[in-house]
Amino acid sequence: MTTENDNHLELSDFEQVVELLEKCLWWHHKAVMEFRALPQTVRLEAIQHLVGIVRKPSMGKALEFKHGMDLTGYRKVFFDGATRRIVYDFGDDGRIRIWSMGDRFELQAYKDTHRRANKK
């Protein structure tokens, strides 16, 4: 029987899951810093969304050209009470690439992704 807690990560598993996610996803180095700077409870929520992305890569909402930024092909997932975004896309090899884990405020996560992706 599955309980409600079966779908949630325990803090004791936290560091192992972080290491696994950092290895199985491609991360922009600044996205790693953003992730590691999050408070632990917010990081735990972000991890749950990252696991969801790994399991179902299309789960994020598709982005498009908006506010002068072409983010076609990128996807977003909300977390931290919808105040932050995980912005990701897929590499040529199909690997999930994490570009930003930033604030929604003033479109910061999108601006960071646009700037970072265009400096590849």
Image (spheres, rainbow, N blue to C red):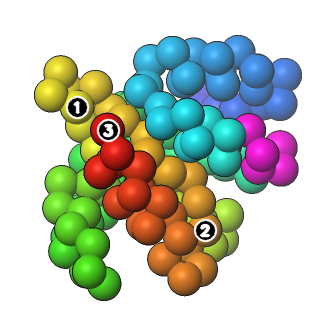
Q: Secondary structure at mark 2?
A: strand
Give the Cα distance between marks 2 and 1. 23 Å
Q: Secondary structure at mark 3?
A: loop
Q: Which residue is mark 1?
A: 91
Q: How many marks?
A: 3
Return the x and y of residue 84 as percentages of the image width and height.
59, 65
Q: Residue at x 68, y 40 (%)?
A: 33
Q: Residue at x 59, y 60 (%)?
A: 102
Q: Which residue is mark 3?
A: 120
Question: How would you classify the magenta stretch by its main secondary structure?
Answer: helix
Q: Amino acid at mark 3?
A: Lys
In the image, is 13 to the left or to the right of 78? right
The span shown in magenta is 35-40
Return the x and y of residue 34 as percentages of the image width and height.
66, 47
Q: State which mark lies toward you, 3 or 2.
A: 3
Q: Earlier in the sequence, mark 3 or mark 1?
A: 1
Whether residue 43 is visible here, answered yes or no, is yes
